[in-house]
Amino acid sequence: MSKKKKVTIVFDIGKTNKKFFLFDKNYKEVVREYTELPLTTDEDGYPTEDLAALQNWIKDNFNAILDNEKYEVKAINFSTYGASFVHLDQKGNVLTPLYNYTKPMDDEILDLFYEKHGSKLKIARETASPQAGMLNSGLQLFWLKYKHPEIFKKIRYSLHLPQYLSYLFTGICVSEFTSIGCHTNLWDYDKADYHDWVYEEEIDALLPPIVPTSASINTSYRNKKIKIGVGIHDSSSALLPYILSKKDPFLLLSTGTWSISLNPFNDESLTDEDIENNCLNYMRIDGKRVKASRFFMGNEYKIQVEKLCAYYGKEYGFHREVQFDQDLYLRLMKNKNIYFRFEGIILKRKMISETDLKSFATFEEAYHQLMIELMDLQIHTITNAIGNSDIKNIYIDGGFTDNDVFMKLMSHHFQHYNVMSTHSPLGSALGASMVISNKKIDETFLQQHYQMKVLQPLILNL
């Protein structure tokens, strides 16, 4: 009989896609499965994650791998989106729906919070969390306390989603740094402790003891010894392979619906200006801060490209074939101006009443102009995230690595840096697998797993 392959299982839970991976001992992907689960609604009829369906999906996949003769499961871990709490009573029963972080929060509750605990800007600066209602998951606990006091009284423990999934396997309640530190309003970064308001509202009593992200709990399943991780927040997890394999300081630009610049080597406190520029902190697995700045680039890009396709009579998708045109770029830069009215981006820029496409003869010309205007904001957010840190390397991952115009402009504007594109479909799952392993990795790791390419700076005949 052939020897069983030793594997780590990772459940990587996104808002849309639920993914399930098996990794071997060298972090090579053995199995990957995706599913989308139908949503349910909370007591107000607001759409939200169906926790029971999620649990069943996880249990079914786990049992199927345990029953599979090819694999021997050595470890399990979980990476999930943040800003989501599961509230348990004394007996471990779930008390509420998993509230959706896009659910609007009652103004009177928010007013009460700021009246009691300090201004929006003060709280945002101290907790490194731009104020955004339910997206600041600590506010969900405050909201429950004043909106549903009868339920709040029954809470024994509130677990962040990654730690709840771990609890399903271990029965042990813990808190963990990366989940506490992602725009939750809970953590005072300068104090390196929960914020004063958490103690004043006696919410600290509902948060289980904090353990390191690399902690694991050994347990027996059907007489098999399995190591269960405590879970990790997905943004921190996506950053981890870079931190573990690269010795020199770097910035990771993660592109997609949001463009997020992550700098794990900047430990400056956030200023009022940072908060106004949509900067925030994430947390490394050791509790150190990661300075981040973000803007809604992918969302805006999609809105504007749809308009370009309609205006120039092109099929949606045509934009993917556009290659960088140096002559076109130089011509546009000669009389640089704002031509696009952005709809979903709140960063400061000159506002115009409507987009002007009449100035551009072709789709390609208008598309280059759009990328120039988005790049101006991208430069601004990257510069904010770099701050005073000594960074020479920029890694770019996510959807925009396939965009030739974007990548050429990045290599041009950041020509004093080593700019590298990386391509990994594993995203946050790989970090979750690595964090509970004791295996050391070296500089070649990203090369093997991420198809890294160094971008050559443009030599422009200016």
Image: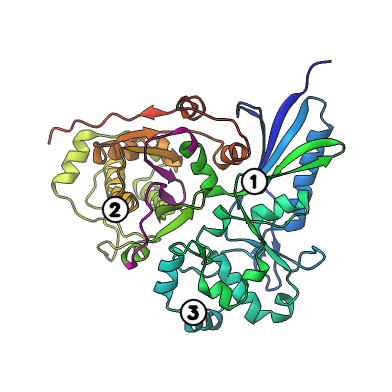
Which of these two is toward me, 198 or 325?
198
Residue drawn at 28 percent across, 66 percent down? 353
- Whether the magenta-drawn stretch holds residue 255 is answered as yes
- Does the CB distance between marks 1 and 2 fall below 8 Å? no
| Mark earlier in primary sequence (3, 1) | 3
The three-letter code of the residue at mark 2 reads His
| Mark earlier in primary sequence (1, 2) | 1
Q: Which residue is mark 1?
A: 215
User: Residue 117 shows which numbered tag?
Assistant: 3
User: Dot 2: few (<14), some (14–19), or many (≥20) neighbours within 10 Å?
Assistant: few
In space, the residues marked 2 and 3 are separated at their CA atoms by 32 Å
Q: Position of residue 153 (x, y in %)?
A: 73, 77
- Closer to viewer: mark 1 or mark 2: 1
The magenta stretch is: 244-272
Q: Is the N terminus in the top left, top right, bottom left or bottom right quadrant?
A: top right
Residue drawn at 61 percent across, 27 percent down? 28
Q: Position of residue 27 (x, y in %)?
A: 60, 29
Q: Position of residue 234 (x, y in %)?
A: 56, 48
User: Residue 98 shows which numbered tag?
Assistant: none
- Closer to viewer: mark 3 or mark 1: 1
Say left or right for 231 vs 130.
right
Residue drawn at 27 percent across, 40 percent down? 414
The three-letter code of the residue at mark 1 reads Ala
- Closer to viewer: mark 2 or mark 3: 3
Q: Secondary structure at mark 2?
A: helix
Q: Is residue 317 visible?
A: no
User: Dot 3: few (<14), some (14–19), or many (≥20) neighbours within 10 Å?
Assistant: some
Which of these two is toward me, 367 or 103?
103
Q: Which residue is mark 2?
A: 380
Q: Position of residue 325 (x, y in %)?
A: 25, 34
